[in-house]
Amino acid sequence: MATHKLLLLPGDGIGPEVMAEVKRMIDWLNAQGIARFEIDQGLVGGASYDADKVSITDATMAKAVAADAVLFGAVGGPKWDPVPYEVRPEAGLLRLRKDLSLFANLRPAICYPALAQASSLKPEVVEGLDIMIVRELTGGVYFGEPKTITDLGNGQKRAVDTQVYDTYEIERIARVAFDLARKRRNKLTSMEKRNVMKSGVLWNEVVTQVHQREYKDVTLEHQLADSGGMQLVRWPKQFDVIVTDNLFGDMLSDIAAMLTGSLGMLPSASLGETDVKTQKRKALYEPVHGSAPDIAGQGKANPIAMLASFGMALRYSFDMGALADKLDQAIAAVLAKGLRTADLKSDGATIVSTAQMGEAILKEVQALHG
Ligand code: IPM
Ligand code: MG
């Protein structure tokens, strides 16, 4: 059996609590001989700043490069508001994304039947929802240069961020999205702001060309990103796969998260290019929710997004799709039994702690495994 090297970076806030539930799952898989994971752990974000005055050390970066996959919790919190911009907690995550070239961010938004009531939208709007947001993750305004604040000397300052995309960046993210659509309901919606932004004009043009050249069998639609956001809350089931840039993807995926009942439900996978020789790709898996400092350390956090992120690692890094399916089924089963963490509170439900939710999901996986 192959040994898979995993680097765990729990980070800040609720990160360590939700990561503990993934460890519980991994320990069981290892003990049963179902898989063989070799685990290493490191600091990132505020935790790394407190220890080493940087948001991630070079040594931890080297471990991330050497790992088959990185599991990431969350970073940030008011405690680190005063630290310099360059070493703020989020910088650790951005460095991981950039240095590992994790350009493709997959954010599936699935509304489990038991949670249709928990969404802020009407149940019929979200029931059975299953969409995939593909967010470009290493380009755009997050990384474009110049990125500066200049003192103009007249009591004014000028802040500049740069939105920049090259053809190859749009082509490769479009291919990831078209490939996913082919395995799903064969529909892709591309979102940009071509009515205002040059990068939107190029985005639209390149996605259209890739479609014409390589993916004519997939239905392609274009939507302006603002209108796309509106459509996401109006009738989200019209979508299958959505492809969009770094900043729009950040915002649209938070919107999509609420369709599923809670931000605590959304996992994600950040993937690099597949190496032609080894057929391996760099990968990082993280829940979309943040560090939630207000509830950290109280056992209130929902571990489902973190566990489902591990599920995505099983699927996309380790070719263990059947096991990932079981994990998804286990999550659905536990929710159907009425177990809820505090973020998912609903009438008649049993409120459980982070650890109780993790244990219950593990029990279901064990039962499914026979
Ligand atoms: C996300 C987060 C990050 C982002 C932050 C923590 C830097 O909001 O993954 O969606 O903006 O990309
Ligand atoms: Mg975000």
Image (tube, helix red, strand yellow):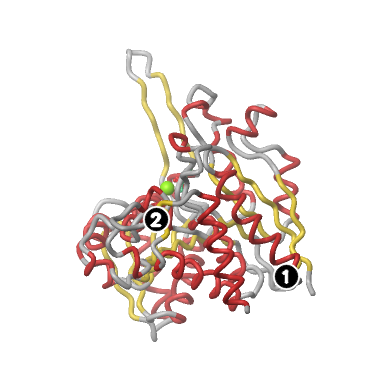
Identify the mark at residue 258; answer none if there is no mark: none
Can see residue 214? no
Q: Report the residue that reaches farthest toward the top.
A: 154
Please say if the residues under marks 2 and 1 sit with CB atoms less than 8 Å apart.
Answer: no
Tell me if 269 is positioned left or right of 99 in this view: left
Q: Position of residue 166 (x, y in %)?
A: 47, 57
Tell me which corner region of the image, top left, top right, bottom left or bottom right, holds residue 88. Answer: top right
Front residue of this view, candidates 348 and 117? 348
Tell me if 44 is positioned left or right of 146 in this view: right
Q: Pick the quarter of the image with the N terminus.
A: bottom right
Front residue of this view, candidates 168 and 36? 36
Residue that appears at 43% across and 57% down? 265
Residue kind at label 2, given as amino acid type: Thr
Would you place residue 58 above or below residue 51 in this image? below
* Mark pair 2, 1: CA separation: 32 Å
Residue that appears at 64% across and 46% down? 9
Tell me which corner region of the image, top left, top right, bottom left or bottom right, holds residue 31. Answer: bottom right
Tell me if 226 is positioned left or right of 361 in this view: left
Would you place residue 21 above or below residue 55 in this image? below
Residue that appears at 47% across and 35% down? 293
Q: Mark 1 points at which residue?
A: 35
Tell me if 43 is positioned left or right of 358 in this view: right
Q: Position of residue 127 (x, y in %)?
A: 29, 70
Residue kind at label 1, given as amino acid type: Ala
Front residue of this view, candidates 79 and 301? 301
Element on which disc 1 rests = loop
Q: Where is residue 194 in the image (x, y as percent from the top left)?
A: 28, 58
Tell me which corner region of the image, top left, top right, bottom left or bottom right, holds residue 278. Answer: bottom right
Q: Name the residue under label 2.
A: 350
Q: Pick the quarter of the image with the C terminus.
A: bottom right
Nearest to N terminus: mark 2 or mark 1: 1
Would you place residue 234 above or below residue 247 in this image? below
